[in-house]
Amino acid sequence: MDIIEQVKERLSVFINLYDILRIIDPIKKKTIIIKDDHVEELEGTCYGFWEREEFCENCISMMAYIENDTFVKIENNEEKVFLVIATPLILENNKYIVEILKDISQNGKIIAKTNNNENFMEYFLNEMNEKIIKDELTGIYNRRYINERLPVDINNSIVKQCPLSVIMADIDFFKDVNDNYGHLIGDKVLMDFAKLVQSSIRKNSDWVGRYGGEEFLIVLNNTDLENAYKISEKIRKLLEDTIFEYDNVKVKITSSFGVDGLTNNKVNIQELISNADKNLYKAKTNGRNKTIVSEVI
């Protein structure tokens, strides 16, 4: 309660700036909400406020936590539109994330009470939020989303005591594709590779992001190393048997894979990605077009 009072005191001069204050744990997704001087620790998750059952893809509290900066977005809840500001606040040497929510449905004149406008606003907000966390070329998640989402999945895996595995995938000799066919064809190969990976993993629990260049990170929730290896091999063999065709150009590629998973409660995002990347390097230095996993299957 002392922390809550300190937050309220610091923001008291901005009383007209917000309607709701939320103190967020962006990793555990827990919330304390302050509204009209009423303080309540909400059950469930912070994204339940937006009447969602899944983690917000564009989580500005996670951005604020990771980058130690202030972020702003617009969100909708039923017929209301909120301006949301997430900012880190240091209290007693601990970092907290404070979300400031202001209902701008009326004063901002953003939305009228018609179904068409409401549907358009929801579409507009979704489009705007997606552009922040999606890779422009391939349409899959980008590096920012990886950094925001993976710590949450790691925490959930530890709390629920269920396995989590990651796969680092890199297209073999991709420079040769660009040199031989041009960057336009190279871009199409990246797009089709991303589609192939997406079609090979579960839609509701797994996800893939473009880590950089021709390197991709695949995250498999509730999946142990043995099954992660099988999924990696399925993708590898499917790619090996696929010929991409673009007008009169036929392109055949392979990819190398490095697999790692949570081994104890001390593993963090940096260690997990680093270990998978080391296994990827082993796969590439040992002939490419193969999967290297952290444990012997």
Image (cartoon, rainbow, N blue to C red):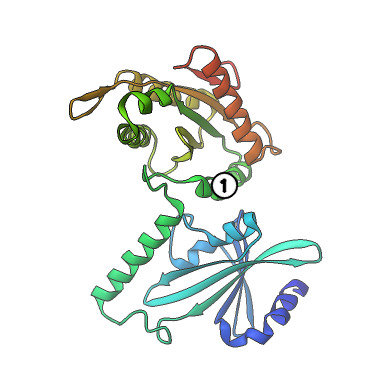
| Label 1 residue SS | helix
Q: Quadrant of residue 189?
A: top left
For image coordinates 43% across by 87% down, the residue present is 107
Left or right of 153, for residue 267: right
Residue 251 vs 55, above or below: the answer is: above
**Could you say which is closer to the camera, residue 276 or residue 45?**
276
Can residue 30 be spotted in the picture? yes
Amino acid type indicated by mark 1: Asn
Name of the residue lying farthest toward the right: 92
Location of residue 37 in the rendering, given as x and y in whole percent from the top left corner = 64, 84
Location of residue 132 in the rendering, given as x and y in whole percent from the top left corner = 45, 56
For image coordinates 40% across by 56% down, the residue present is 130
Can residue 44 be spotted in the picture? no
For image coordinates 66% across by 35% down, the residue present is 271
Question: Mark 1 — residue?
Answer: 147
Residue 288 vs 203, above or below: the answer is: above
**Could you say which is closer to the camera, residue 126 or residue 28?**
126
Circle 1 crowding by C-alpha within 10 Å: few under 14, some 14–19, many from 20: some
Location of residue 172 in the rendering, given as x and y in whole percent from the top left corner = 44, 22
For image coordinates 69% across by 64% down, the residue present is 96
